[in-house]
Image: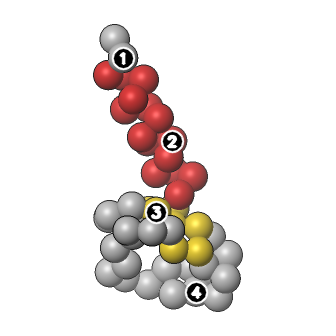
Amino acid sequence: IGEKAVILGQTGVTKSVEGNKTYFGTPIAESRQKLKELATLKSLTKK
């Protein structure tokens, strides 16, 4: 785990991650990207 990396709750870390970033989810991904994906899925299911 890189220096100053932030791992949010219930995140499965199975590989090395860069520092100075925030991670979320299983499988692990950068939180900004993962939250964008979740928002897109939510908007698609509203229709």
Residue 31 in the image: above or below residue 11: above
Q: CA distance from mark 2 to mark 1?
A: 16 Å
Q: Quadrant of the C terminus?
A: top left
Q: Earlier in the sequence, mark 3 or mark 1?
A: 3
State which quadrant residue 46 falls in: top left
Residue 18 percent coordinates (x, y): 56, 79
Residue 9 percent coordinates (x, y): 45, 68
Give SS at disc 1: loop
**The disc label shown at residue 46, or none:** 1
Q: Earlier in the sequence, mark 2 or mark 3?
A: 3
- For disc 2, the marked residue is 36
Residue occupying the far top of the picture: 47
Q: Nearer the viewer, mark 2 or mark 3?
A: 3
Q: CA distance from mark 4 to mark 1?
A: 38 Å
Q: Nearer the viewer, mark 4 or mark 3?
A: 3
Q: Earlier in the sequence, mark 4 or mark 3?
A: 4
Q: Nearer the viewer, mark 4 or mark 1?
A: 1
Identify the residue shown where x is 67% and y is 75%. 20
Give SS at disc 2: helix
**The disc label shown at residue 24, or none:** 3
State which quadrant residue 11 falls in: bottom left
Q: Earlier in the sequence, mark 4 or mark 1?
A: 4
Q: Earlier in the sequence, mark 2 or mark 1?
A: 2
Q: CA distance from mark 2 to mark 3?
A: 12 Å
Q: CA distance from mark 4 to mark 2?
A: 23 Å
User: Is the C-beta separation of discs 2 and 3 under 8 Å?
Assistant: no
Q: CA distance from mark 3 to mark 1?
A: 24 Å
Q: Give the amino acid type for the residue marked by disc 2 in the picture.
A: Lys
Q: Give the amino acid type for the residue marked by disc 4 in the picture.
A: Gly
- For disc 4, the marked residue is 2
